[in-house]
Image: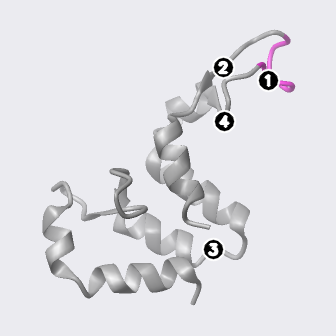
Amino acid sequence: MGKLGKWLEAKEQSPQEQLASPSSIQETLEIHLGSGVYVPKNVLWSASHANSPTTMARRLLLGVFDIETLLKSNLRGVKSKNANPGETKEPLDRIKIDAIMRMY
């Protein structure tokens, strides 16, 4: 079990922290303590069982951002090398990206 798996287990054992999490239909957990970035519990479980850091990051990205945001954005908001030449995309939310990167 990796670092994320241990963290997820600890979160499950401390119900007082879960009471402070935002309520929704699906139970959510904070990605990194104090980040204010929440994802569904099943996304954290799936990311913690990923076979590689790349897969883990992709699963977290899909849990944090909606697909429309991911399609029109990139990490830094620079011109895409693969899309239409000269097309500049919006940067992804830095706070959310930092929370994902802290998982490593």
User: In the image, which disc is placed on residue 75?
Assistant: 4
Sequence-wise, the earlier of marks 1 and 2 is 1
Q: Residue at x 58, y 79 (%)?
A: 49
User: In the image, which disc is placed on residue 89?
Assistant: 2
Q: Residue at x 19, y 54 (%)?
A: 22
- Whether residue 10 sits left or right of residue 101 in the image: it is left
Name the spot of residue 2 as percent of width and height, x first. 59, 84
Give 96 or 73, whichever is nearer the viewer. Answer: 96
- Whether residue 95 sits left or right of residue 20 in the image: it is right
Q: Which residues are magenta?
A: 79-85
User: In the image, which disc is placed on residue 50?
Assistant: 3
Q: Are marks 2 and 3 in contact (CB under 8 Å)?
A: no
Closer to the observer: label 3 or label 4?
4
Q: Are marks 3 and 1 in contact (CB under 8 Å)?
A: no
- In the rendered image, which quarter contains the C terminus? bottom right
Q: Sort mark 2 into few (<14), some (14-19) or many (20+) by Cα contacts within 10 Å.
A: some
- Image height check: is 22 above or below 49? above
